[in-house]
Amino acid sequence: MASYAVAIMSHLRPYPPTTSIHLTLSAGRLAVFDDDFGRAEVHLNYAFAHCSKNHPKNKKLVLRYLVPVKLILGKRQGLTIVPVPPQLAAVLLAAIPRRCKSEARCRVSK
């Protein structure tokens, strides 16, 4: 899969970064609709890694497709996909409904 990614990304070098990110996002979305999740993961990972931190809406758009692809491929990452401030993590973990009665079994690993 890595050689495929290198071959695809080498074709995008002549384009400006914004264009190459947009093209890889579009290719990743197309791969999702074609049920080619391995190829979608390569494209979406590239788009997410190279997207500027100054454009959170674009990162959110990439994550809208990247998270389900990773779940389908069985790569669960929890809260490590995007760095989450500790205060927000505490709020998110408190909002998760608990399904068991014993508090010891319901602990969320950190």
Image (tube, grey):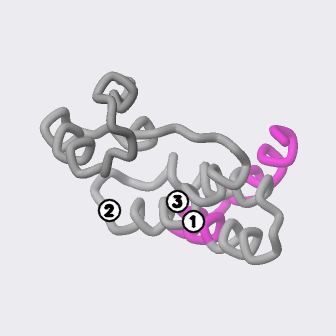
Give percent across and percent down for residue 77.
Answer: 52, 38
SS for callout 3: helix
> Which-is-in-front pick, marks 3 and 1?
1
Q: Which amino acid does label 3 sit on?
A: Pro
> Which-is-in-front pick, marks 2 and 3?
2
* Quadrant in which the C terminus is drawn: top left
Q: What residue type is labelled 2?
A: His
> Which quarter of the figure has residue 79?
top left
- Binning the other alpha carbons within 10 Å of mark 2 as few (below 14), some (14 to 19) or many (20 upward) gives few
> Which quarter of the figure has residue 24?
bottom right
Q: Against 95, is 109 above or below?
A: above
Q: Are dots 1 and 2 in contact, CB under 8 Å? A: no
> Which quarter of the figure has residue 13?
bottom right
SS for callout 2: loop
Q: Is 97 in the magenta? A: no
Residue under label 2, please give it.
55
Q: Going by the image, does 47 lie left or right of 37? A: left
Relative to the observer, which residue lies in front, 23 or 105?
105
Q: Give the range drawn in magenta.
A: 1-25
Circle on res. 65:
1
> Which-is-in-front pick, marks 1 and 2?
1
Residue under label 3, please give it.
17
Q: What residue type is labelled 1?
A: Tyr
Identify the residue at horizontal 31%, vertical 61% (top origin): 56
Give percent across and percent down for residue 95.
Answer: 23, 51
Q: Is 20 in the magenta? A: yes
Identify the residue at horizontal 82%, vertical 75% (top origin): 34
- Binning the other alpha carbons within 10 Å of mark 1 as few (below 14), some (14 to 19) or many (20 upward) gives some
